[in-house]
Amino acid sequence: MDNYSTGNPKKFVFVVQGEGRGHLTQAMAVYESLIAEGHQVLAVLIGTTKGKDLPAYVKERLRTHIIPMESPHFIKDKSNRSISLIRTAWHTLRHLRTYRHSIRLIRHIVKQHRPDILINFYDPLVGMAAKIYSLQTKIVSVAHQYLYLHPDFHFPKGSSFRNKSMIKNYTALTAAGSDALLALSFYPMQQMKHKHLHVCPPLLRKEIAEQDVFAGKHMLVYIVNAGYMKNIIRWHEQHREVEIHCFTDSAAVKGKWEYHEGLYFHSLDDRKFLYYMANAAALVTTAGFESVCEAMFMGKPVMMVPVENHFEQWCNARDAAFCGAGIYAEQFDLTLLQDYLPAYQSNNHMKDWVSQSATILNGVISELTSSTPLPPTEHAFFEPSLPMNETAAVH
């Protein structure tokens, strides 16, 4: 993401939903641009699980006061593969007191630092804090999921009413009290500035454009849920001729681990991951927004296998395939990707779209920090309603 200038230096505080890699990567992209222009990021609160260490690269890249806090998140099943909605709901109820403490922590940090803007990367506790307290700061919320609140967005065919209703209401909760929303999108859509929802390109780090990209021979795999490692191992045992480099957050993987010849597992490392992507033949991923965007920017074909019971990834996979990113599948059968590769055609859509991110983000920050008061922040679109035309689907 290109650097931008907003005039006088401003003070920022971040709150980041730390599950997975996407929101953290977006926070790093915004952080490096703000710092390059002389602004201050005084603190970064990261919602995580008790006892879970943050990846080392996060601490290296966000050189400010990092404050872990417990925040709601998905709970996986016992096999560490799919999302368990029952276990997630029970875990959330059991930790309500802990989350109240985190909400008070957000208020304390804002009162302590008095930032010009709090940037929320999809953590629901910011919305709750804004409802309970007067945070006395402007709030910008950033996430791909805010696109679900755009009236022109249509969920993929086959989406259930229940799933759509749940994700839109949860997304609206994270947006409560926000003065502006940045809805990150694979493609441009009509802007809604009058409702403070801005469709924005992916916020990619500058290292993406600095990579020496070429078509290599290895397959790059990214799986947060370590339970899927068995699927990769099982496939590779029948296809030893294919070189695979797989990145995962499994506690069993430290650095680089050669499982057997041609199959290598790596612990999460943002720079290392980009290096392997730049010279990969293709990417296989569980349909997280950020990784798919990075592959599209580099012109790498993608096979997306959504985490089981993860509706957002189910939508991402179909949305990205619609844009020409690649294919989606229900299982990690890389043979499907091998068969698809001859038909893949790269284009510059993502590079052209990403080049506009600085202008859009700059405009939002400039508007919020100008002397001209903004209209009231109680907007109807924060109370989601499903489209009237339930049959419409562009995917």
Image: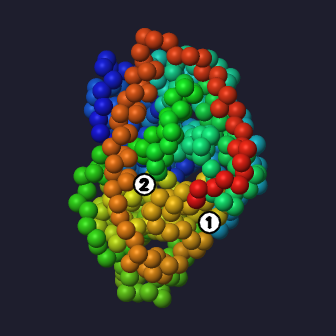
- The spot of residue 44 in percent (x, y) is 46, 34
Which quarter of the rendering shows the C terminus?
A: bottom right
Mark 1 is on which residue type? Answer: Arg
Q: Position of residue 312 (x, y in %)?
A: 61, 53
Left or right of residue 74: residue 301: left
Q: Residue shown at 35%/33% (left/top)?
A: 359
Rendered position, 280 above or below 86: below
The residue positioned 27% from the left and 32% from the top of the image is: 36
Residue marked by disc 1:
81
Up/down of 186 relative to 177, above or below: below
Measured from the top left, where is residue 110 in percent x and y? 52, 22
Is 134 placed left or right of 223 in the picture? right
Q: Count all numbered tags in the image, as a single digit.
A: 2
Residue kind at label 2, given as amino acid type: Cys
The reply to whether residue 40 is in sight is yes
- Which circle marks residue 293 in the picture? 2
Q: Nearer the viewer, residue 140 or 250?
A: 140
Nearer to us of marks 1 and 2 is: 2
Question: What label sits on residue 296 in the rendered view?
Answer: none
> Could you tell me which residue is drawn at 47 percent across and 58 percent down?
323
